[in-house]
C-alpha cells in the first residue's frame, strides 16, 4: 500500500497569515498520463470531509483561491493564503493512483 | 443540489451483520463511480472500496474484502454497504462519496459494534 505521511501534526495560524501543510507519498503518484493523483480534503469540526484540491493542483468547485496545491512526484504541499477562521479543521492528503486508496493521518489547523 | 444521505447505522452486536444505504439525488447516479470511506472515533479516513457505474467493477481495501460487500441499485439511485462479522474495530462513521475523487460526501452514519 502507498503510505501518505503528513506534517506537521498541527499548525496554529494568525488570521491573515499563510499556512503550509506537507504530504509525502511512499511511491510516485505521477501516472504515465502525466497526472499526479494526490488530493486534499478538509474536514471541518463535526462535518464530513470536503474536496479542496484534485490532481495535485486543481481547485475543486467552490473552493476559495486562497487554497493552492503543488508538488513533485512524491512531495506535495497545500498552501492556504490569508487564513480565515472558517479554515479550521483537519486537512488530509490522499492518493488516488492505485488501490487501496490511502490517506495521510491529517493535519489540524487552529487559529491563534 | 447534490445530496448523499446515508442510513442504516446503529448499535450492533459483535459478529452480526448490518447493511448501510446511501440515497443519492441531484445528479445522474448512473454516471458516477461511488465509494465508501469510514472514520473510527477520533481517527483518520479509511477507504473501504468503490463500485463503477454498472457494478461490473468493485474494488475493496484488502483487509475488508471478505467482510464487506458494495453494491448499487441504479433504478433506486442507492448505494449499499453490506457488512458482516462485525467487530469492535468496525465502530466508525461510514461515509458514502461520489466519484473517483470523492467530490461529494454524505453526512455519514455511525455504526457502533458493542455487546
Image: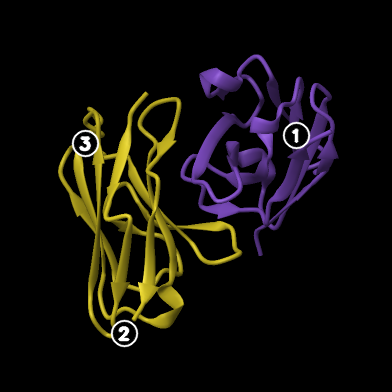
Chain colours: A yellow, B purple
Q: Which mark is residue A34?
A: 3
**Residue at left offset 27%, top offset 55%:** A8
- Secondary element at image label 2: loop
Q: Residue B114's spot in the image, x, y percent?
A: 79, 35
Measured in 3D between alpha carbons, the distance from the residue under mark 2 to the one under mark 3, in whole angstroms, is: 36 Å
Relative side of B18 to A55, left or right: right
Q: Residue B46's spot in the image, x, y percent?
A: 52, 37
Q: Quadrant of the C terminus of chain A?
A: bottom left
Q: Are marks 2 and 3 on the same chain?
A: yes
Residue A94 location (% of width, % of height): 38, 43
Location of mark 2 (residue)? A15
Chain of residue at mark 3: A
Q: Looking at the picture, do discs 1 and 3 lie on one chain?
A: no
Could you tell whether A54 is left or right of B32 in the image? left
Residue B14 — which label?
none
Chain letter belonging to callout 1: B
Label 2 to label 1: alpha-carbon separation:
42 Å
Residue situated furthest top in the rendering: B66
Mark 3: secondary structure: loop
Tell me which numbered mark, 2 or 3, is placed earlier along the sequence.
Answer: 2
* Residue on which the image places disc 1: B80
Name the image quarter holding residue B60: top right
The residue located at (58%, 31%) in the rendering is B50
Q: Kindly check if marks 2 and 1 are in contact, taking CB atoms under 8 A apart as contact.
A: no
Do the numbered discs 1 and 3 sit on residues whose CB atoms are within 8 Å? no
- Closer to the observer: label 2 or label 1? 2
The CA distance from mark 1 to mark 3 is 34 Å
Residue A110: x %, y % from top left: 38, 72
Amino acid at each position: 500500500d502507498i503510505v501518505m505521511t503528513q506534517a506537521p501534526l498541527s499548525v496554529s495560524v494568525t488570521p491573515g497569515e499563510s499556512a503550509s501543510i506537507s504530504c509525502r507519498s511512499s511511491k510516485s503518484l505521477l501516472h504515465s498520463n502525466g497526472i499526479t493523483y494526490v488530493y486534499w480534503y478538509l474536514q471541518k469540526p463535526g462535518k464530513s470531509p470536503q474536496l479542496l484540491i484534485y490532481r495535485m493542483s486543481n481547485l475543486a468547485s467552490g473552493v476559495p483561491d486562497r487554497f493552492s496545491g503543488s508538488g513533485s512526484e512524491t512531495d506535495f504541499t497545500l498552501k492556504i493564503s490569508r487564513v480565515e477562521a472558517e479554515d479550521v479543521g483537519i486537512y488530509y492528503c490522499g492518493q488516488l493512483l492505485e488501490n487501496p486508496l490511502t490517506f495521510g493521518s491529517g493535519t489540524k489547523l487552529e487559529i491563534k | 443540489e447534490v445530496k448523499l444521505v446515508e442510513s442504516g447505522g446503529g448499535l450492533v452486536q459483535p459478529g452480526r451483520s448490518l447493511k448501510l444505504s446511501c440515497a443519492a439525488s441531484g445528479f445522474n447516479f448512473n454516471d458516477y463511480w461511488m465509494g465508501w470511506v469510514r472514520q473510527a472515533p477520533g481517527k483518520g479516513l479509511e477507504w473501504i472500496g468503490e463500485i463503477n457505474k454498472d457494478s461490473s467493477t468493485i474494488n475493496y481495501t484488502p483487509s475488508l474484502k471478505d467482510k464487506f460487500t458494495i453494491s448499487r441499485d441504479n433504478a433506486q439511485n442507492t448505494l449499499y454497504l453490506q457488512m458482516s462479522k462485525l467487530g469492535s474495530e468496525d465502530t466508525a462513521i461510514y461515509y458514502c462519496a461520489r466519484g473517483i475523487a470523492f467530490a461529494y460526501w454524505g453526512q455519514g452514519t455511525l455504526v457502533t459494534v458493542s455487546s
